[in-house]
Image (tube, rainbow, N blue to C red):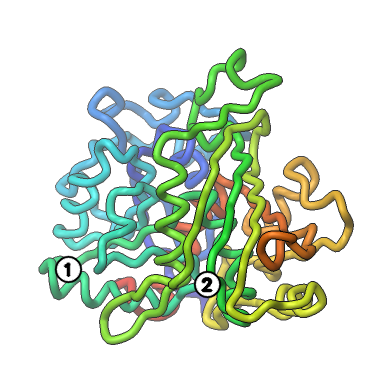
Amino acid sequence: MSRPRIPVAILGATGAVGQTFIRLLAGHPWFDIAEVAASERSAGKRYADATRWIEGDLPEAVGNLTVTTCDPSAVRAPIVFSALDSNVAGEVEAAFAAAGHLVLSNAKNYRMEADVPLVIPEVNAAHLQLLDVQRASRGWTGGIVTNANCAATMAAMALAPLHQAFGARRMFVATMQAVSGAGYPGVPSLDILGNVIPFIGDEEPKIEREMQKMLGQYAAGAVTGAPFAVSAHANRVAVENGHTVCLSVEFDRQPTVVEALAAFRAWRGAPEVHGLPSAPDEPLHLFESDDRPQPRRDVMRGRGMTVSVGRVRVDPLFHLKFVAMGHNTIRGAAGGSILNAELLVATGRAGVA
């Protein structure tokens, strides 16, 4: 017997990530888009009239919804997906959580708060237990669960099986990040075509901090960050979708390439994620050819939810080096939030039937 679909709302629905939420939630077996919310200038309009739809076809039912304001008094759905920019997300998301809504946030504002889960379900599902701590400490009946910076997501997923097996000690991370990560309209074409921009505001500190939290251990109501050091370089490149991350890693116990390949092949992540609607059959896909992964060829593997890994080899300065790549607006943003929501519902932590 199928479960009744849960009404959900999308905050910041007119933007690029908000539109990705709509595309991914169209026809979802558990969730039904009941409300869309955006800024005051869009409120009161039909969604189809309030947004410039940028990819594929806008679902007719969503296009006919009336846009509301990002105010808890205007939204009834128990689960809220937030695609809000960080300059407004902090107060708005807290207001929704205090009003009893479960907020799945893409913004940076609460990621590093001690009582807020920063979750990749296959990697650190146990961190969702922080939601109980958060509700108790803040007096919220709802809550906030965050997903990570998009590049940190790709790096953490690729590192997870090796860190579990061999204990990461320190690493160098260099990213080549797609223009879609800058939102829409994003980076001007004459700035990025034929170019690499070696700076993305606040990106490197987020990668360095968030990887430690995601790969840390939950115990006794708190997460202890993983004890490795991260040095990150972030670059914007002329790729539409797909963040590529090159990692060089030193471990507590040096693995051989054969051992590392075996760890990648065997890893399937937390078992409670298996079978969820948005979970890919293969959270990590290992390439053994020299020229993969590539965004153009591999970004939609697992419907955009699989992270691809390749070029695993000995590093002359550290122990191993390898490449990871994944879809930044699906696995690294909207799709990651949806998978978090599915896990919360499946484990009874969402607070809805």
Q: Position of residue 159 (x, y in %)?
A: 60, 67
Is the residue 144 above or below the residue 332 in the image? below
Q: Quadrant of residue 78?
A: bottom left
Q: Position of residue 133 (x, y in %)?
A: 22, 76
Which residue is outermost to the top?
Answer: 190
Q: Please tell me which residue is depicted at 58% across the width and 64% down the height of the picture.
A: 157
- Residue 125 or residue 34, whichever sits in front: 125
- Which-is-in-front pick, marks 1 and 2? 2
Q: Position of residue 324 (x, y in %)?
A: 68, 55
Label whose residue precedes the other's in the sequence (1 or 2): 2
Q: Is residue 214 left or right of residue 194?
A: left
Residue most extreme to the bottom = 220
The spot of residue 104 in percent (x, y) is: 36, 57
| The label number, if any, that marks residue 123 in the structure image | 2
Q: Nearer the viewer, residue 186 or 216?
A: 216
Evaluate whether residue 25 shows in this view: no
| In-image side of 271 versus 218 (left or right) | right
Residue at 58% across / 54% down in the picture?
172
Residue 141, which numbered label?
Answer: 1
In terms of depth relative to the viewer, which is nearer, 262 or 278? 262
Could you tell me if residue 287 is visible in this image?
yes
Q: Amino acid at mark 2?
A: Val
39 to the left or right of 238 = left
